[in-house]
Image (spheres, helix red, strand yellow):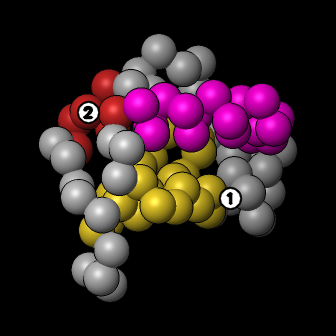
Amino acid sequence: MMLSVGMKEGICKRLVGYDEDIVEIIQFGSSSVYAPEYARDVDLLVITKDKRKYGGYLDCLADLLFDMDVVVKEVGAF
């Protein structure tokens, strides 16, 4: 699944709208590296200073026309 720059910006705006403490959003997995043309979902790693309720991250992306896998970690939790 190839994401345009505009789609990526839209995803980031939605996530930051839910959690203003996000410091990094990283796309990983087959959608960005291995075989984007065959990917069935988009994998995101969200790094934040203060983790919110997980469902909120999913809710702000729920109306997109493709599946999203979102992993949320707090700074220093690695």
Image coordinates for residue 46, horizontal then vertical, percent: 43, 57
Q: Is residue 9 magenta?
A: yes
Q: Nearer the viewer, mark 1 or mark 2?
A: 2
In the image, residue 9 sits, relative to residue 59, either above or below, namely: below
Which secondary structure lies at badge 2? helix
In the image, residue 3 sits, relative to residue 49, either above or below, namely: above
Identify which residue, 70 or 51, lies in the foreground.
51
Q: Which residue is mark 1?
A: 30
Which secondary structure lies at badge 1? loop
Q: Mark 1 is on which residue type?
A: Ser
Circle 1 packing at 10 Å, graded few (<14), some (14-19), many (20+), is: some
> Residue at coordinates 78% horizontally, 30% vertically from top-left?
6
Q: Which residue is mark 2?
A: 56
Among the 4 quarters of the image, the one containing residue 77: bottom left
- Earlier residue among tags 1 and 2: 1
Image coordinates for residue 22, horizontal then vertical, percent: 41, 54
In the image, residue 17 sits, relative to residue 31, either above or below, namely: above
In the image, residue 28 sits, relative to residue 4, either above or below, namely: below
The magenta stretch is 1-17
Note whether residue 37 is visible: yes
Which quarter shows the N terminus? top right
Among the 4 quarters of the image, the one containing residue 7: top right
Image coordinates for residue 27, horizontal then vertical, percent: 62, 57
